[in-house]
Amino acid sequence: MRVGPEALDGLRDEIAECRACPRLVAWREQVAVEKRAAFRSDTYWGRPVGGFGDPAARVLVLGLAPAAHGANRTGRVFTGDRSGDWLYASMYRAGFANQPTSVSVDDGLELCGAYVTAAVRCAPPANQPTREERDQCLPFFVRELALLSELRVIVTLGAFAYEALWSVFRDQGMALPRSRPKFTHGLEVDLAERTIIGCFHPSQQNTFTGKLTEPMIDSVFTRARELSRAV
């Protein structure tokens, strides 16, 4: 049964009010006040960031956490930073997005057949949330999964997201391989009615060094498209 956008909107509003992790609350709000010089005139969101996309999505993209001067500034996941530039450009080329850029919440970006979210909803210091912070936040993701009932493919951006997803599936009692496959780019794990695909995170650390290239990320979303269409 498909879920209307109202349920996801309500969850997104609830996420935005969360103050469960003191370290993350302090950091995201500090960044929103101090700002980066290039964004001095911007009003930062400075709150937790919910997911974004098509309620009927068959493909879910799971990232790590909002970037301090990206989603923590704009209020939309993977919007306003270099990682988002790479992600949405690739999703556009694969037919999941109506435009290749994402700079603000009112830039007209729409997703079709895909939903993007993160394991942790607040920008963490040094982009490194703790395991405890991750586990505190994951119930929001569990609720997103329940609402996104059409999902067939989950793209995990990086090992952190992959491990978070595995933790959720394990706790839900899903039938999993006895030994968790090691994360790598292009990894595929077939589960009951869903497939996990691994993708290196489109962070500058990976894209500037060539660890992740455009053909590499495009191959992931092309494959996600193929699997999402399979009966």
Image (cartoon, grey):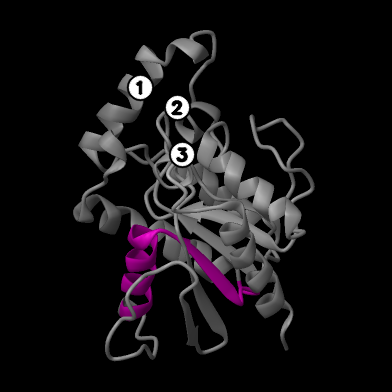
**Between 207 and 131, the one nearer to me in the picture:** 207
**Between 200 and 58, the one nearer to me in the picture:** 200
**Which structural element holds mark 3?**
helix
Q: Is residue 156 left or right of residue 173?
A: right
For marks 1 and 2, give the one nearer the viewer: 2
Taking the spot 57% from the left edge, 60% from the top edge, the residue there is 216
Q: Earlier in the sequence, mark 1 or mark 2?
A: 1
- Which residue lies under the disc numbered 3? 16
Taking the spot 37% from the left edge, 49% from the top edge, the residue there is 120
On the rendered image, what quadrant is the C terminus found in? bottom right
Mark 3 belongs to which amino acid? Answer: Ala
Taking the spot 50% from the left edge, 71% from the top edge, the residue there is 186
- Which residue lies under the disc numbered 1? 31
**Between 57 and 68, the one nearer to me in the picture:** 68
Q: Residue 47: give x, y in percent of width and height.
A: 42, 32
- Which residue lies under the disc numbered 2? 69
**Which structural element holds mark 2?**
loop
Q: Residue 43: give x, y in percent of width and height.
A: 52, 16
| Gap in angstroms between the C-alphas marked 1 and 2 | 8 Å
Taking the spot 57% from the left edge, 31% from the top edge, the residue there is 80
Mark 2 belongs to which amino acid? Answer: His
Q: Residue 144: give x, y in percent of width and height.
A: 51, 62
